[in-house]
Image (cartoon, rainbow, N blue to C red):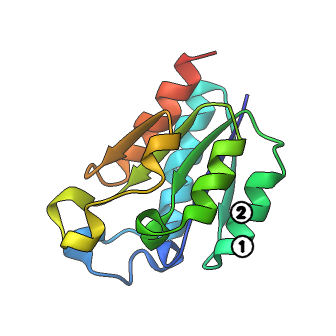
Amino acid sequence: MKILVMNGPNLNMLGKRKSDIYGGLSYEDLIDIIKARALDLEVECEFFQSNHEGELIDRIHGLDFDALVINPGALTHYSYALRDALEIFTGPKIEVHISNIHAREAFRNRSVVSPVCTGTIAGLGFTGYLLAIEFIAGQR
């Protein structure tokens, strides 16, 4: 089983962003943590991060994965184009947010991608990614 772990704008800056919201670990640390758990679960994870909406959409259009874990970053709140691309992929897809988007600024409280995702995990830090791949691995 191949899981695409996709991260949107500014997530490459983990470790440099507000540590009280995003923690102090880097994007590379996140990848290492997920890789270790994926090895335990015997699933393959591919990682893709872009600060560009079109690149994220193009990657989804590849449709060469079995499941998707996505943190769309700020695109969560307004990208109907990303939502439509996610809708095309019919496999399991879990929306993940490091922070609790529902406890932050009002503009972050709404996700336009949630309705086309299998589930959403928010506010659990990097653990949210691990829970997402564990859920997906359990679906095989």
Residue 35 in picture, x, y percent from top left: 59, 46
The numbered disc on residue 57 is 2
- Callout 1: helix, strand or loop? helix
Q: Residue at x 68, y 53 (%)?
A: 85
Q: Residue at x 49, y 79 (%)?
A: 10
Residue 113 in picture, x, y percent from top left: 48, 52
Looking at the picture, which amino acid does disc 2 mark?
Answer: Ile
Looking at the picture, which amino acid does disc 1 mark?
Answer: Gly
Image: 21 above or below 3: below
Quadrant containing the C terminus is top right
- Callout 2: helix, strand or loop? helix
Q: Quadrant of residue 129?
A: top left
Q: CA distance from mark 1 to mark 2?
A: 5 Å
Quadrant containing the N terminus is top right
Residue 113 left/right relative to 3: left
Q: Residue at x 25, y 76 (%)?
A: 19
Residue 126 left/right relative to 44: left
Image: 33 above or below 3: below
The numbered disc on residue 131 is none
Image: 118 above or below 123: above
Residue 46 left/right relative to 41: right
**Quick one: label 1, few (<14), some, or many (20+) residues within 10 Å?**
few
Tag 1 residue: 54
Residue 134 in picture, x, y percent from top left: 48, 28
Q: Nearer the viewer, residue 80 or 43?
A: 80
Q: Are marks 1 and 2 in contact (CB under 8 Å)?
A: yes
**Quick one: label 2, few (<14), some, or many (20+) residues within 10 Å?**
some
Q: Nearer the viewer, residue 47 or 60?
A: 60
Residue projecting furthest to the left: 103
